[in-house]
Image: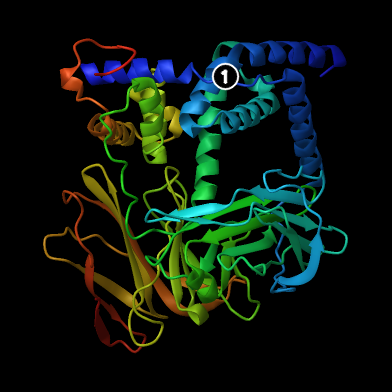
Amino acid sequence: MGRGDKAERDVAFAAFVEQATPSLMRTAWLLTGSTEAARELVQASLVKTYAAWHRVRADEALAYTRRVLVNHNTDTWRRRRGEHLVADAPERPHHDSQRADHRDEVARLLATLPAQQRRVVVLRYYSDLSEQATAEVLGISVGAVKSAASRGLASLRTAYPRPSTELSSPATEGSIR
Amino acid sequence: MNDLFEDQLRADLHSAAGRPAYDSIDPTEVIGEGRRVVRRRHRTQALGVAAAVAVIGVVGFLATDTGRTTTAPPAHHSPTEPSQASVVFNDLSTNFNGVEVAGPAWVRVDLDPATGAVTYTFNDRKGTSTSAGASVAPGGGSITWGTGDGYPNLVVGVAPAPATHLTDIGVRGGTGGSTSDAKPLPGTRYQAFVRLYSVTTSVSQLRGFVWADSAGAIRTSDASVKAYSTDFVGLGRGPSTLVAVPNWDWLGVFDDDGASSVWISEASGTFGNQVPRVEMGRLDGKNSQVTVAGLLPAGATGVTPHYAAGMASHPLQTAVLRDADGAAGHYTGFFAQFVDKTPKGRPSPWLTHISWTDPGGQRQESTLH
C-alpha cells in the first residue's frame, strides 16, 4: 500500500472515529457503568478496528466496531471474573420505592445483571438489534439470547421502581410518584 | 409483541446513556496505537513466532518483602505505566457475600527482560510503597508468584504470556471468592497476574498454578509436579480438556464454551481407591448443561455409565491422559457433556455408578457419591 493510500485510509478512519464515538460510548457506558471504563473500551475497540480497517466495509464499520467492543468487554469480564465459583449469589439490591428517576434507576439496575444478560439487554433494547443479530454479535445461539433476555427482563421488571403494568404510557420521563 | 415495560426500558436506556458527559477520543491517538498494533503483528509474522515450547523452571518462588520503602505518590494517584515490561493493577478489591475486601491501592509489576528480575511494588491507601523481588527465566517459560508482606489476601505473580486457563490449585471452593486480573508485560513473553481472595486461608491453601501453554500442553508451577490431560468433544466450540494433577489431588476441566466462563471444580474422591470425578451443571434457561468427567485406572475398557434415576443415559468418551511431553500416565479419562431438561436443574450426583473392564479382563464397578 502506498503512502497516499495510507493517508487516505487514515483520513477515512479519523472521520469514522468522530462519527461513531458518541454511539459507541453510550453502548460502552451501559455495558460498564463508568465513563472512564467506557472510554477505555471504546478506544481499545477502535484500535482493533483500525488494525482491520482494510477489510471493514464502510457501511458495516459501526456494526463491526460494536461487535469488537462487546466481545472485548466479554474478554475483559472473563479475565477479571476469575475461575472460582462462589457458594451463594450476591443478594440482589432491595427495591427502593423512593427512587425518583427511571433513567438513574435503569443504569443502576443494569449493573446488577450478570454480564451476559446485561450485554443482551443492551444490544436488544438499546441497540435495537434483533435476536438473530444479537446472537451473531455475541457468538451465541438465538436460544441463548432469548433466555438471557428473558431472565434479564424479569430481573429488571421485578426491581423497577414501579410495576410496569401500572404505567399509563411508555417512555415517560421524570419522577414516579 | 412488545409490552409496556420493554418500551419503558428502551426509553430509559436511551435517556440514561445520553446523560453522562463523555470524554472525546482523539482519532490521532487511536491511529497511532493502531499502527503500533499492525507493526507488532507484522513483526511477529515475519519472525515466525509460533507455539514456543515452554520450559518450566520455577525460580524466585516466593516474593518476600525486601524491606525497601520508597517515597510514593499520594494514595489516590495512579502511577503511569512505563513503556516496557511494567504493568499496574489499580484499586484491587473483591466481594464475597456482601463483604468487601480491599487490597493495595495499586500494585506495579516490573520485569527486566534481560535478567528476568521481577519487582513488585505495593502501594497502600495511605501512599506508602513497599517492594518485593523475585525472578523468572529471561527467555520465557517460567512462573513466579507470591504475596507481599502486609497483604495476606493478595497473590501476585508473573507467568508465561501464552498461558491460558491459569488456575490456582488448592483453594477450596465455596469458602470464599476472588478477583483476578492479568496483563501482558509489554515486549516480553510474560504476563503479570494478581488474585485477591476474600479470605486469607485461600492464600495459605494455595499449592500452585496450572495452565495451558501456547501448544495446548498443560503445565504446572512446580517442575516436580506433573499434569496429565486429554481432550474431549463437548458442547462448546473448542475441546474440553480434562486435566489431572495427582500430586495436588486436583481434577478439572478446561472448557471454553465461548459464552461465559471456564469451568473449574474440585474433584470428588481422591486419587487413591475411589474414582475421582467432577460434575458441573450450569442452568441455562429451563435446561442445564451438564458435564461429568473423571478418571479410571489405565487400561480400562468397556466403560459403562449408570446415571441417576430419571436421567437419560449418555455415552462416555474415554481416552488416555498424557503428560506435557506426551507420555501416558496411569489414568483413563471419561467425559460426557449434555443437556438435561430437568426444570431448575437436577441435584447431583448425576453419574451414580460406573463400571469397566480392567486389563486383566475382570469387570469392575464403583459407586460414586
Instruction: Give above or below for B271 relative to B323.
Output: below
Number of marks: 1
**Residue B318, position in %: x, y?**
38, 68
User: What amino acid does circle 1 point to?
Assistant: Ala
Residue B164 x/y as whole percent: 58, 55
The residue at 62%/19% (across/down) is A56
Q: Chain of mark 1?
A: B
Q: Is residue B149 left or right of residue B289?
A: right
Q: Residue at 76%, 15% (x, y): give it.
A: A10
Tell whether B355 sits left or right of B270.
left
Q: Which residue is mark 1?
A: B21
Quadrant (top left/top right/bottom left/bottom right) for the N terminus of chain A = top right
Q: Is A43 or B220 nearer to us in this picture?
A: A43
Where does the image place residue B342, in percent across and percent down from the top left? 16, 51
Q: Secondary structure at mark 1?
A: loop
Left or right: B71, with A132 as reference point = right
Residue B312 is left or right of residue A62, and the answer is: left
Dot 1, crowdedness within 10 Å: few (<14), some or many (≥20)? few
Q: Nearer the viewer, residue B35 or B365?
A: B35
Quarter of the image holding residue A18?
top right
Q: Is residue A173 above or below residue B339?
A: above
Looking at the figure, which quarter contains the C terminus of chain A?
top left
Question: Residue B2, can we see it?
Answer: no
Q: Residue furthest left?
A: B310
Is B138 rendered above or below residue B79?
A: below
